[in-house]
Image (tube, rainbow, N blue to C red):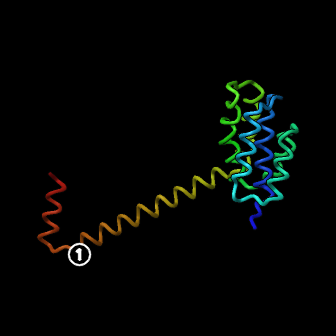
Amino acid sequence: MNQASESYVAMFHGAIALAWHDSILAQQEQQQLHTLIEKNIKLSSQQKQELAAGITQPLSLTDIWSRITDPLDRAHLINISMLIFWNDGDYCDHEERAYDFMYEQHHETLDIAGLRAEIASMANESRARIEREESDRYYAMSIPARILAYVEELI
């Protein structure tokens, strides 16, 4: 039996809250939410029932946000928020503020400096490995082949 994490379920509650953010949930939006919930293979039957029951009631994003604890779940909600906001063909100021709220809250939890340092370290390791491989290939060549390779680089 599937059982999604609490953070993952809260992400769906967040999507419902975003759909309600303009205080209107059209029938088409309700149907899309029901479809997304029903077709999700990570959710258990009980989780699907809980989420489906919550579609008809407005939710507050600020109340739900703290329950979305996995950074990937938060990032996914931010990514799909524009699709949800534009679904009714109108993107308004309070939807923009909701997006800014999510982005800022999520950004504060990320160790950007640490991520940059990790990426730089990975790039340096990759560069060093490539240089070692090139050096090994070069020294595996005979002397005439090395001279020819050197001349080809000059041309």
Residue on which disc 1 sits: 140
At label 1, counting other C-alpha atoms closer than 10 Å, the crowd grade (few under 14, some 14-19, many 20 or more) is few
Residue 102: quarter of image: top right
Q: Residue 50's spot in the image, x, y percent?
A: 85, 52
Q: Residue at x 46, y 60 (%)?
A: 124
Q: Nearer the viewer, residue 108 or 139?
A: 108
Q: Residue 126's spot in the image, x, y percent?
A: 44, 62
Task: Classify 19 as above or below 120.
Answer: above
Q: Residue 43's spot in the image, x, y percent?
A: 75, 58
Task: Classify 127 as above or below 56.
Answer: below
Q: Residue 117's spot in the image, x, y percent?
A: 57, 56
Instruction: Answer with left or right where residue 76 lies relative to residue 120.
Output: right
The amino acid type found where label 1 is placed reads Ala
Q: Nearer the viewer, residue 155 or 87?
A: 87
Q: Residue at x 16, y 74 (%)?
A: 142
- For the N terminus, which image quadrant? bottom right
Instruction: Answer with left or right where residue 124 lies relative to residue 18.
Output: left
